[in-house]
Image: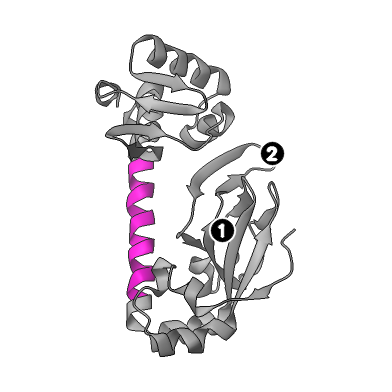
């Protein structure tokens, strides 16, 4: 369960990509309607089917966007990190939440109510464009995932996911965030056992190197993608 809401400073809002185009006066006007919440690890921020009430922006920590069936089988649609936002779709079309969002680690979130979100959209073109770019990015990402499921084998899907999750560190592509094999399986539509086998094969083949909890990707992994 999220902690109590607290006020937000304009200095914090300046660090949020969604508000990067706002001037000082605009930030002062919006800061009273933005609240900050602390979310413990493993807590559910929103559940599929719930009424849509707020837009959320990630300040720190990571969350997983997921769906599950009646038997409890889960699929992870994406993992969100600092600067990303979620919950905007239902605010735009007034539909219930389409997926659940759960904190992978302790998170700090900003929240804007549905009424205030729509007011901001109507009064700030740049914010509207930023939201549209975010939606387009998610649509493109969804297209890639659908293509991966249809066209790539499990080796290719694992390689693609690792590349997508990696960041450039001292000239090397490294997955620095903890990525459990069970979560990889839920993201690519495979069993945990199959993912373990593929990860071992990629390591033996020299495509990846394990350094503690980090996964270093070799250039040759592009051949497995």
Query: Is residue 143 in the magenta section?
Result: yes
Identify the residue under disc 1. Answer: 98
Whether residue 216 appears in this view of the structure is: yes
Residue at position x 35%, y 70% from top?
A: 130
Q: Name the dominant secondary structure of the magenta segment.
A: helix
Residue at position x 52%, y 18% from top?
A: 196
Using a 10 Å C-alpha cutoff, classify the residue at mark 2 as few (fewer than 14 neighbours), some (14 to 19) or many (20 or more).
few
Query: Is residue 19 in the magenta section?
Result: no
Picture quarter with the N terminus: bottom right
Q: Quadrant of the rendered structure where residue 32 is?
A: bottom right
What is the CA distance from the residue labelled 2 to the residue labelled 1?
16 Å
Q: Residue 143 shows which numbered tag?
A: none
Name the element at disc 2. loop
> Residue 172's x, y, as percent?
30, 31
Q: Residue furthest top?
A: 204
> Residue 223's x, y, as percent?
24, 22
> Residue 140's x, y, as percent?
32, 52
Q: Which residues are magenta?
A: 128-146
Residue at position x 48%, y 62% from top?
A: 85
Using a 10 Å C-alpha cutoff, classify the residue at mark 1 as few (fewer than 14 neighbours), some (14 to 19) or many (20 or more).
some
Q: Which mark sits nearer the N-terminus, 2 or 1?
A: 2
Pick the front one: 73 or 18: 18
> Residue 184's x, y, as percent?
51, 31
Identify the residue under disc 2. Answer: 72
């Amino acid at each position: 369960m999220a902690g109590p809401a607290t006020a937000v400073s304009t200095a914090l809002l300046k660090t949020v990509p969604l508000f990067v185009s706002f001037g000082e006066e605009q930030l002062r006007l919006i800061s009273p309607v933005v609240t900050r919440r602390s979310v413990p690890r493993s807590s559910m921020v929103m559940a599929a089917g719930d009424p849509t009430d707020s837009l959320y922006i990630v300040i720190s920590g990571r969350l997983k966007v997921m769906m599950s069936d009646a038997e409890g089988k889960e699929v992870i649609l994406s993992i969100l990190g600092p600067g990303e936002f979620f919950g905007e779709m239902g605010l735009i079309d007034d539909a219930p939440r389409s997926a659940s969002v759960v904190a992978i680690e302790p998170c700090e979130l900003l929240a804007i109510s549905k009424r205030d979100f729509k007011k901001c959209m109507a009064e700030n073109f740049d914010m509207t464009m930023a939201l549209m770019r975010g939606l387009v990015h998610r649509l493109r990402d969804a297209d890639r995932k659908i293509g991966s499921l249809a066209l790539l084998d499990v080796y290719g899907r694992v390689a693609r996911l690792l590349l997508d999750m990696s960041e450039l560190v001292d000239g090397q592509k490294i997955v620095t965030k903890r990525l459990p094999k069970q979560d990889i399986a839920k993201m690519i539509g495979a069993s945990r056992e199959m993912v373990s086998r593929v990860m071992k094969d990629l390591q033996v083949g020299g495509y990846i190197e394990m350094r503690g909890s980090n996964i270093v990707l070799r250039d040759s992994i592009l051949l497995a993608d």
